[in-house]
Amino acid sequence: MVPDQVAFWTSGAFLEEVRAWVAVQLASCGIRLTGDWEQPHIRAWSSTIRFETTEGRVWFKVNGSGTAYEVSLLALLSELCPGLAPEVLAHDSTRAWSLTRDAGPVLRSIVGPETVLEYWKELLPRYAQTQLDIAAQRSRFVATGTPDRSPKQLTVEYRRLVSDLAAKPTREGGLTREEVVALERLLPRYDEWCAELMASTIPDTLQHDDLHSNNVCWSDALDDLSTVRIIDWGDACIGHPFGTMLATLNSIAFHAGLLNDDRGGITDPCVLRVRDAYLEPFTGLGSRQELLRWVTLARSIGCLTRALSWERAVQDAPASVAAKYEFPARGWILELLQPWAQLD
């Protein structure tokens, strides 16, 4: 077990080391710290510190072992698609440290749920087109350590995660015998869903996997799409791009009061129009019927992707952390047994 990350990341020694590093990195850009700072985000998997400077606000981030790849991923995104994520001023992949310019307020803080759908319909086609544009760079993203959660790999991970959770007591996030039997019974169908996506014309590529309105920054010029930045890539993976639509549509529907149940069951036409906006750049790769089928499949198999993201995020944290979040790895894989995720 590694030392308590939260305690370490809030220690005086760590904060002083970070401040010194940030000051040196900024000096090389002709920027100075003003002395004002705050540490608003402290989790077992990452922490951020906001620094004020002579050229505006910057953000320092440190990642834990499970999300450490985010640092190298951000650097590659800055190279391949500048403007998608915040500008990286400096990074240290060995220590999993990054320093970025402030990207503005998060969308959720400036737009209410009654109007946010229109902004998503503007943003998602740009994001989807970027996914297509960078699909050919798959090997470079894998080289950053970004996890492979392609449909092919998920069939392997399904078996592995069920086995691991079956060996744990339920009080530690494990599965009951009945749950194991149900998930094993579902396995052939899960394999079929993954095989169908593998056979589709949509290439595997980078997908954020936690794209919601608190991870989208939009400047005060809400009519200017070029100011949008997507933050917090610590759950990102390589896989079917439509997997994005699990977290994104669920979050949109939840905050708009349009989610039919706790996590799935999205049927509201307003939310489905957001889905359709996302699919626009893919229209040359399949019929509408095929695209809708594939996005439904990707949302279902993505329950495992979300489980794996949580598993990695808390892999070195005390057991109490997973318990605090109600054992999300178990919770997400069990979503596969819910009616909304059942296909055919």
Image (tube, helix red, strand yellow):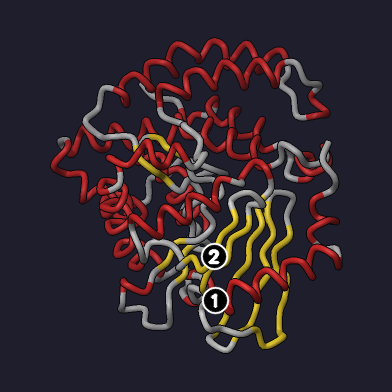
Looking at numbered disc 1 in the image, what kind of residue is underneath it?
A: Ser
The answer to whether residue 126 is above or below residue 304 is: below
Amino acid carrying label 2: it is: Ala
Residue located 54% across and 57% down the image:
232
Badge 1: few (under 14), some or many (20 or more) residues near its Cα, within 10 Å? few
Where's the N terminus, which quadrant? Answer: top right
What residue is at 73 percent from the left and 44 percent from the top?
325
Say which quarter of the image contains residue 171.
top right
Give the number of marks. 2
Q: Secondary structure at mark 1?
A: loop
Residue at the disc numbered 1: 28
Q: Are marks 2 and 1 in contact (CB under 8 Å)?
A: yes
Q: Secondary structure at mark 2?
A: strand
- Please name the residue shown 48% across and 50% down the image: 73
Mark 2 closeness class: few <14, some 14–19, many ≥20 residues within 10 Å: many
Residue 309 found in image quarter: top right
Q: Which residue is mark 2?
A: 90
Q: Quadrant of the C terminus?
A: top left
- The image quadrant of residue 283 is top left
